[in-house]
Amino acid sequence: MEGVAEHGGGAELDRKALPLIGGVGRGAVRSPTATQFEFVGKASGFNMPATCPQCGAIFPDGETCGGRFDALQWKELEDPAYYAVHHIGVPCYLLQHNAYSRRGWIEVRDLLRRFLRERWTPAMARRRYHAAGEPNGQGGSLTRGEKLPGVERIVWSFTVAEVRRDSADAYGADIRRWGERVLADSENLVRAEVGCPNI
Ligand SMILES: [Zn+2]
């Protein structure tokens, strides 16, 4: 599988990763647009609470998930200690914002599970998927096509809005927590979809 950005050391960016788990940098991830946000509250004006219709994140000051996520990606670029969890945070964000096709959603969630529960590294994922053949070669695109029904109904218990940025330790802990919550919150849907014992 192309697409899992390896980290550490020089933190060289793998921009071919974009279709699967996103890349790094402004514009690499298709963020929710302002029009996708539902504004809540009675007051008018730009700086009012907004909730993301996809992940449920609430920002009190008009910020958006896309803006916050971009800021986190820039922080990762600046500091390798933050980048260490890049391969976990990107799929969390893209899964919650339903960026994948039906097949892509299941595959990327399974990859997230392997990262968290089976201690896979990005390099291990690359070797595994390369050995198995390019997953894009059959079965359709990971990003284009039919969406996995039910993703839009998941109530997410942790979002990008809650990720702390004040230290690399806090950031790493919160990104991992985010990943665990994504797995738990989507467990029923995935069980119904694939019936896989490893969910
Ligand atoms: Zn969101």
Image (cartoon, grey):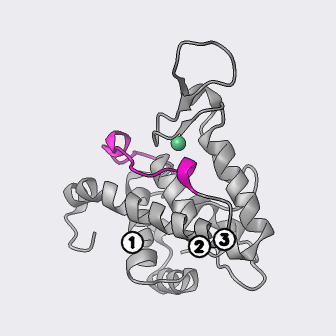
Name the residue that disc number 3 marks.
Answer: 168
- Picture quadrant where residue 166 is located: bottom right
Q: Which mark is residue 113?
A: 1
Which residue is nearer to you in this view: 37 or 107?
37
* Amino acid at pointer 1: Arg
Q: Is residue 70 left or right of residue 42?
A: right
- Label 3 vs label 1, nearer the camera: 3
- Residue 160 among magenta residues: yes
Q: Residue at x 70, y 51 (%)?
A: 70
Identify the magenta region: 143-163
Q: Residue at x 26, y 53 (%)?
A: 189
Name the residue that disc number 2 marks.
Answer: 4
Q: Tell me the SS state at disc 1.
A: helix
State which quarter of the image contains the C terminus: bottom left
Q: Tell me the SS state at disc 2.
A: loop
Q: Tell me the SS state at disc 3.
A: helix
The answer to whether residue 20 is visible is: no
Q: Are marks 2 and 1 in contact (CB under 8 Å)?
A: no
Q: Residues within 10 Å of mark 2 (few under 14, many from 20)?
A: many
Which residue is nearer to you in this view: 152 or 173?
173
- Picture quadrant where residue 194 is located: bottom left
Q: Residue at x 39, y 83 (%)?
A: 118
Q: Are marks 3 and 1 in contact (CB under 8 Å)?
A: no
Relative image position of residue 164 (x, y in whole percent):
60, 58
- Label 2 vs label 1, nearer the camera: 1
* Amino acid at pointer 3: Ala
